[in-house]
Image (cartoon, rainbow, N blue to C red):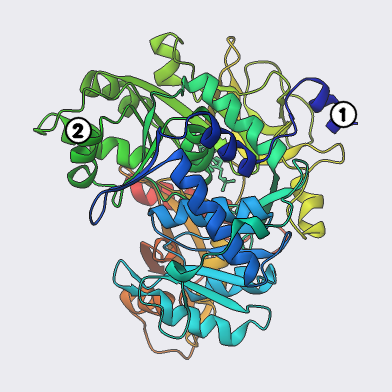
């Protein structure tokens, strides 16, 4: 019923991501599509990119990767990331978007939970041996038949050797079929996976292009990890390909890496999380680099404080667009022509007139207009459930299909949303989401730990940091905070999930039902910060 409506409204147009690239290759073959500046500049026109994607798609097919198969992709911001992902889209295999920061615990989980047939990674990145990790995971996950490695592959298959004859490519996916599994920041012990279709995702991308004025002249710098939903699609590298512009991949996020690239590549647009936007704003005054090609910068992923937002445009002399989005779907943007006060003080309006927004109290009753409450949403590019998670879906979606975002928002008279807080048990560490339960489970493996509760504490720079309250066993030797952090790191999880702070306590505040009161702990953490 909804699908018919979304098709009739022209939102779902029967396009696929692979087909979209092919179309540009036909229409604008010589336009520059992709630039990978490091270690030396390489670039691809639309025709060249399309050819490499076909060749890779055929190579994957020859190695038995087929439509519907899951493939865990963990690559830094390099051309290979874009090429591999597009090749998988083309054959209808589903990329599972891991982040470079993920370690054994996350990668093993993604591979085993999705029954992945392949894992694509890089030999080494940021001092970490991913090829060795791949060996470990391959031994543990029986479905994992293939590991493709960019660089020194060791026992694995070098990605550079993956090529086949595109003439033999099987028919690709239909537009209504799944395109990939995106990661949710999550609130539970293990991350949830988000199934997105070609049709629904391309609608959000097309809508984003219109709102952000992306066109053939756009030169977009991908600064954040390219697999994150924000730089993929808001409007991100897919949005730029959809409009026929140029994507430039930044190997780093710091001004020392990015500013020279902005100057040299005449970058017109980029997307940043708030802490980075703050660092960049501070660095502009002193930079010798010419950033005048920038027309707009998107900032989102976590709340951008109004004070920080006010400093943006005077420093950069270009437009700020706030974006409040989620990999589950709904994306809100401030509009380029919004009044300045709206741009600095709100997190924007939904992409689609058919994005349904409800703001409700604890009993799912709509709150009076203008008051804050829980944000529920349903619409043409918001999922109706996580992948293979029926239990969790009963909690995260209403019976009529609204997604419970876990965000506390209010709506201004103009219809813009302002994010006021969060009801879900999650830490938003400068745009990187941490599920406390996942970290708590890791800390509980320590033999000296009796109980633990991980909470968010306010942080001027990151917005939030993580604090682990640890209760030791009665008979345990005293532990130091650094030992807890080291233990967590040694368990093989992403570094951003290692608690920033560790405090040892005798007991947690208890609620009526005798469970740990996270609310009470957060209040205690807030007042601890105030002292
Ligand atoms: P995820 O579901 O992991 O994709 O994370 C999406 C979540 O990030 C949202 O539900 C919000 O909690 C948070 N978020 C994203 N953008 C913003 C923003 N501009 N302001 C405040 N929170 C944001
Ligand atoms: O935080 C997010 O997940 C996010 C932020 C901005 C997102 O998914 C998006 C835009 O599409």
Residue position marked by numbered label 1 in the rendering: 4
Q: Residues within 10 Å of mark 1 (few under 14, many from 20)?
A: few
Residue 27 place in picture, x, y as percent: 53, 29
Q: Residue at x 47, y 91 (%)?
A: 475
Residue 94 seen from this side = yes
Between the residue at mark 1 and the residue at mark 2, the CA separation in whole angstroms equals 46 Å
SS at mark 1 in the image: helix
Query: In the current view of this chain or complex, which residue is farthest to the right?
Result: 1
Q: Is residue 448 above or below residue 485?
A: below
CA neighbours of label 2 inside 10 A, class few (<14), some (14 to 19), many (20+): some
Report which quarter residue 460 is drawn in.
top left
Residue 48, horizontal then vertical, whole percent: 44, 46
Residue at 37 percent across and 22 percent down: it is: 320
- Between residue 129 and residue 346, name the one nearer to us: 129
Classify residue 155 as left or right of residue 459. Answer: right
**Marking on residue 106:** none
Q: Give the secondary structure at mark 2.
A: helix
Observer able to see residue 505: no
**Side of 251 where 364 appears, left or right:** right
Q: Earlier in the sequence, mark 1 or mark 2?
A: 1
Query: Which quadrant of the rendered structure holds the N terminus?
Result: top right
With 295 as the anchor, is 505 left or right in this view?
right
Q: Examine the image and state in which quarter residue 431 appears.
A: top left
Residue 199: give x, y in percent of width and height.
71, 37
Q: Residue at x 59, y 34 (%)?
A: 23
Q: Is mark 2 within 8 Å of ligand 2?
A: no
What is the number of the mark on residue 263? 2
């Amino acid at each position: 019923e909804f699908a018919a409506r979304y098709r009739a409204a022209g939102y779902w147009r029967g396009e696929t991501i692979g087909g979209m690239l092919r179309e540009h290759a036909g229409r604008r073959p010589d336009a520059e599509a992709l630039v990978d500046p490091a270690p030396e500049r390489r670039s691809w026109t639309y025709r060249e990119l399309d050819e490499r994607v076909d060749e890779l798609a055929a190579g994957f097919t020859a190695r038995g990767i087929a439509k519907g198969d899951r493939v865990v992709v963990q690559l830094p911001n390099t051309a290979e990331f874009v090429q591999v992902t597009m090749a998988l889209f083309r054959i209808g295999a589903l990329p599972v978007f891991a982040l470079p920061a993920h370690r054994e615990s996350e990668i093993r989980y993604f591979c085993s939970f999705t029954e992945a047939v392949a894992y694509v990674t890089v030999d080494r990145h940021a001092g970490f041996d991913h090829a060795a990790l791949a060996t470990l995971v391959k031994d543990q996950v029986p479905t994992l038949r293939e590991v493709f490695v960019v660089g020194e592959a060791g026992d694995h298959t070098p990605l550079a050797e993956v090529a086949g004859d595109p003439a033999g490519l099987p028919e690709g996916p239909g537009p209504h079929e799944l395109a990939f599994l995106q990661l949710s920041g999550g609130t539970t012990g293990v991350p949830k996976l988000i199934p997105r279709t070609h049709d629904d995702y391309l609608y959000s991308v097309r809508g984003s292009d219109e709102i952000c004025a992306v066109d053939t002249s756009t030169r977009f710098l991908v600064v954040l990890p390219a697999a994150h939903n924000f730089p993929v699609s808001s409007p991100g590298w897919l949005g730029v390909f959809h409009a026929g512009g140029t994507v430039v991949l930044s190997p780093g996020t710091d001004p020392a890496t990015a500013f020279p690239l902005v100057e040299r590549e005449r970058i017109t647009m980029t997307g940043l999380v708030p802490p980075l936007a703050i660092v960049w704003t501070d660095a502009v005054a002193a930079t010798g680099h010419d950033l005048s090609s920038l027309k707009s910068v998107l900032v989102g992923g976590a709340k951008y404080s109004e004070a920080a937002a006010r400093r943006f445009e005077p420093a950069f002399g270009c437009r700020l667009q706030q974006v409040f989005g989620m990999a589950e779907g709904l994306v809100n943007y401030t509009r380029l022509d919004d009044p300045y006060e709206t741009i600095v003080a709100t997190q924007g309006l939904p992409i689609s007139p058919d994005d349904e927004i409800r703001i409700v109290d604890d009993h799912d009753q709509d709150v009076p207009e203008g008051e804050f409450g829980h944000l529920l949403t349903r619409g043409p590019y918001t999922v109706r459930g996580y992948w293979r998670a029926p239990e969790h879906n009963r909690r995260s979606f209403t019976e009529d299909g609204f997604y419970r975002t876990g965000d506390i928002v209010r709506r201004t008279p103009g219809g813009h949303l302002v994010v006021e807080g969060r009801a879900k048990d999650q830490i938003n560490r400068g745009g990187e989401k941490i599920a406390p339960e996942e970290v708590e489970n890791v800390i509980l493996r320590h033999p000296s730990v009796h109980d633990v509760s991980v909470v968010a504490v306010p942080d001027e720079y990151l917005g939030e940091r993580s604090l682990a309250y640890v209760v030791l066993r009665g008979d345990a030797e005293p532990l130091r905070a650094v030992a807890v952090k080291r233990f967590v790191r040694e368990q093989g999880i992403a570094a951003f999930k290692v608690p920033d702070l560790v405090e040892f306590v005798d007991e947690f505040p208890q609620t009526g039902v005798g469970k740990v009161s996270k609310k009470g702990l957060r209040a205690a953490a807030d007042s601890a910060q105030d002292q």
